[in-house]
Image (tube, rainbow, N blue to C red):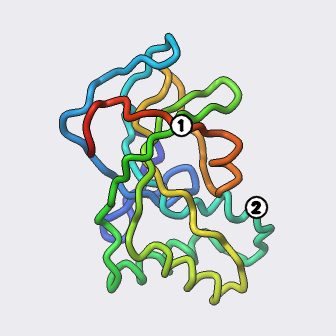
Amino acid sequence: MMGLEPICGGKFVFIHNTICLLVSFNDIPDQININGKTFVINTFLHVSLVCIGKIIEKYNVSTPDFENKIINDFCEFSKNNEIKKVEYTDNFKFVSKEDKETVVIMCKVPNLNEFFGLINKKYGLNIKYPPTHVTLYTLPDKLGIFLTDENDIKNLTKPITNPIGHLL
């Protein structure tokens, strides 16, 4: 994948102005059908942890070199606060925006909330904890859809029954 930059000693990756944790799953179908459409497994399975570009845009951040500062803060924070254990829920959602449709599973990432508390205090922001999720499936040749806050969840998603038939 182009633009995939390892950070924090390779524990995380940075792509599309976002700090991500790579994940993998055994035993999920390569494709599923929903509403008469075929969805294929996402080739870049990850949890978007800190969407720096979206934060800058949404909160009008003007701090110079904010992106690099947040990456450095995150790497420092993750040295003493484990951010690798993802807790998957049974909360699956169908996501739709413009010509893109995806299927996501919501998850929890322990200690991530504390990181947002730290950067909110350090930079005088009020960033809300993101709706952490993994995009499992996309339409062929389409990308995922950013879900950065509860408004995105409310406006772009609808709950669906578990499309893979078992818990992750």
Q: Quadrant of residue 65?
A: bottom right
- Closest to the observer: 100 or 56? 100
Q: Tell me which amino acid carries mark 1.
A: Gly
Q: Tell me which amino acid carries mark 2.
A: Lys
Q: Position of residue 149 (x, y in %)?
A: 64, 57
Residue in view at x 37 percent, y 21 percent: 32
Residue designated by label 2 = 58
Residue 54, above or below 112: above
Mark 2 or 1, nearer chain start:
2
Q: Position of residue 64 (x, y in %)?
A: 72, 77
Residue 127, above or below 147: below
Q: Quadrant of residue 125?
A: bottom right
Residue 14, above or below 28: below
- In the rendered structure, the answer to whether residue 104 lies left or right of residue 98 reads left
Graded by Cα atoms within 10 Å as few (under 14), some (14 to 19) or many (20 or more), the crowding at tag 1 reads: many
Residue in view at x 29 percent, y 24 percent: 30
- In the rendered structure, the answer to whether residue 4 lies left or right of residue 128 reads left
Residue in view at x 45 percent, y 50 percent: 106
Q: Position of residue 56 (x, y in %)?
A: 72, 65
Q: Position of residue 17 (x, y in %)?
A: 58, 56
- In the rendered structure, the answer to whether residue 26 lies left or right of residue 79 reads left
